[in-house]
Structure formats: C-alpha cells, structure tokens
Image (cartoon, rainbow, N blue to C red):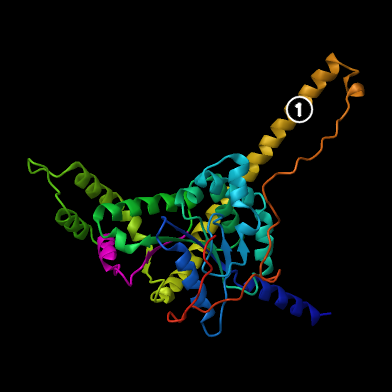
Amino acid sequence: MSTSEPKGKEKETDASSKKKPVAIITIGMAGAGKSTFVRRLNAYLHSRDPPKPPYVLNLDPAVTHVPYEANIDIRDTVNYQEVMKQYNLGPNGGILTALNLFTTKFDQVLELVEKRMDSVDYVILDTPGQIEIFTWSASGAIITDAVASSMPTVVAYVIDTPRTTAPATFMSNMLYACSILYKTKLPFILVFNKTDVQPHEFAVKWMNDFEEFQEALAMHGSGRDSEGEPTYMNSLMNSMSLVLDEFYKGLKSVGVSSVTGDGFKDFLEAVEGSREEYETQYLPDLERARKQREETLRRSKEDSMTRLMKDLSVDRAKNPNGPLSAKWEEEEDEDDDFDENDVIDRVEEGGPGKYIDITNTDSDVQWPRPM
C-alpha cells in the first residue's frame, strides 16, 4: 500500500505539470494578411524537428477558400449564404449572424479542443476579415473569453507594414491596437506582416523614440498651415503619440514575412513569453472577473425566484382554481431554412484534403477557383 501511493501522486503531478497549448487569436484589418499568416505559421510548425502541427480554427464564414487545412471550420456548421437569404441580410450582417449562430455551439468546439490538448502546443484561431465583426461583437467577446478561460491565450494583431509607412496610418493602427488590448485584457503581440516588401524597423523606431515619430510627422506632407502653425491633425497625432508612449513600453512586436517565413521563430518566442505573462498577470484577473460574474448571476437568480414566488402567491389568492384549468399546448418545432450543423473535427471525420507543405515557396500549388 505504501508503494502505490507515491505512484499515484507521481501521475497526478505529471498530469498537472503538462503545459496546456497556447491559443493564438489572429486579428487584423482587412488585407493585412491574416489567413496567409496562419498558413505560414501552420507550415512553419509542421516543418519543425520534430513536427508540431497546430490545431487550427477558421471563424470566417464568408471566405471561399482558406489556404490551410482547418481542423474546425465554421463553414461546416453554418451556411453563410443561407443565413443571408433567410434573414434578408447584407454581407457584414450575414457574417455577424453566422458567427452568432456558431457561438451558440462553441461548447462543442471547446470539447473537441480539449481532446487534443495533450497532443498540440498551439491552437490558432483565424478571425473574419472585417475586424469590427469579431472585436466589437458579443459573439467575438464570448469566444475570446471562453478560449482565454480554457487555456493560455495571446492576441496577435497583424499589421500591413507597407501601408503603415505614413505616420497618420501608423497612428490609426496603434490606436486600434490599444483599444483591442484594453478590451480583451490579454497578452498582445504586434505582428508587422509583409516585411519582405517593407522592413518594419521604422515602426519600431517610432514606438521607441517619440522624437523619431515627430520628425517623420514633420517631414511627411505639409505639417503647417498658411500662418506657419502646426495643423490640427499634426498636433493631434503628436499628442496621441505621447499618450501611447506608456502603451508601447509593455508591448511585444515582431516583424514577419508570410511569403518567405522570416520572423516566425521570433514570433513563437514572443508567444512563449506571453504564456508566462498570461499565467502571472492575466489569469488572476480572469478568475476574479469570473467569480464576480457568477456572484452577480447567483444574486440575479435569487431575486428572480423571489419575485416569481411572490407573483404566484398573489395569483393563487386572486384565482384559487386557476392552476386546475391551465393546459399546455404542444407546439411543433419549426426547422430553420438555413443550414446549421454540429461542430466537427475534420481530422476525426476524415478531412477533405491532406496537408500541403508550402514551406517551399517554389512549389506549384493549384488552389481551386472560387465558385
């Protein structure tokens, strides 16, 4: 008996010491290269020795084709075209509604991910191209909170580097990044994509040195009006850069090229550093917020139950024979016209295709044409 107890304890400590995979939520403006970034990251992890294939989720219901093999694809669960037709919606409204419908079954997604936690190191989420649909919607917040409560989570904000060379565009991106950081309250990594076209060193200088950004702002276009005074926009951006100075200090940034694969080693190092940041800083805050929500929900339920019992007692006093005459009418369930299925794992179901190694950029991959 004495020898069996330590073995049991050993197994428990081994299970508890096993690191959970890190979830990487990719967010970025339309055209920043999120899907291409996920494709290259997927290929890079496959090419490591030994290979470490990630668990990939596609959350964009409107995309015709994704350049990677997704384990879970929202298009297998919700038919975006049928949603638009059923609810008479436009493109953005259709994406938002499809994401809302998928969120109602996100518990199934978490169950499938939990089955693979022992065999994967990274869970990658590719979000819709329209950034506001995910970052500012209720479904996006629910998905982010659910993932962050289950495993260490990092937000990768993908930036189109060639389009941020103008100080005004750079400042707009930084303000948006700042708002997402304080909304999600999760470890945050700025990913300057397309560095094969435009190196990102200029952006790092602007973030680290306020005077560098001021000089660039003065040199870019006409920074003064007819009377020689700084224009309103220049004064505003100067003030904003001072405000964001504290934001830059605790921020990780890397430059990557989704075409050549440069910088992905640095990105994964930043992700591993964010794991420790999540466990020491963000996880206690999440636990406190969860306990507050549970306490608020418990009080709300108690108040609702108290009011219900009072209403029932008043109703019985006014109409003692009422409950005897009450009858329930059975209603037939109405099937929705749009296609909504259970969430599936394409690996378990025998996915539609095999993994294509695109680490060799010379390989000729013929993607199917969109219908």
Disc 1 residue type (three-letter): Leu
Residue range in magenta is 187-208
Looking at the image, is 161 positioned above or below residue 299?
A: below
Q: Please tell me which residue is depicted at 51% across the width and 81% down the height of the picture.
A: 47
- The answer to which image quadrant residue 299 occupies is top right
- The answer to which image quadrant residue 303 occupies is top right
Q: Position of residue 282 (x, y in %)?
A: 51, 57
Instruction: Inspect this view and state whether residue 290 appears.
Output: no
Instruction: Inspect this view and state whether residue 308 appears.
Output: yes
State left or right for residue 235 relative to residue 295: left
Please state which of residues 126 and 171 is positioned toward the viewer in this rendering. Answer: 126
Q: Position of residue 360 (x, y in %)?
A: 45, 82
Q: Position of residue 356 (x, y in %)?
A: 54, 77
Label 1: which residue? Answer: 308
Q: Position of residue 35 (x, y in %)?
A: 48, 64
Q: Quadrant of the N terminus?
A: bottom right
Give SS at disc 1.
Answer: helix
Q: Is residue 324 magenta?
A: no
Most distant residue in the bottom direction: 49
Q: Quadrant of the C terminus?
A: bottom right
Please state which of residues 154 and 314 is positioned toward the viewer in this rendering. Answer: 154
Q: Is residue 191 magenta?
A: yes
State left or right for residue 36 relative to residue 99: left
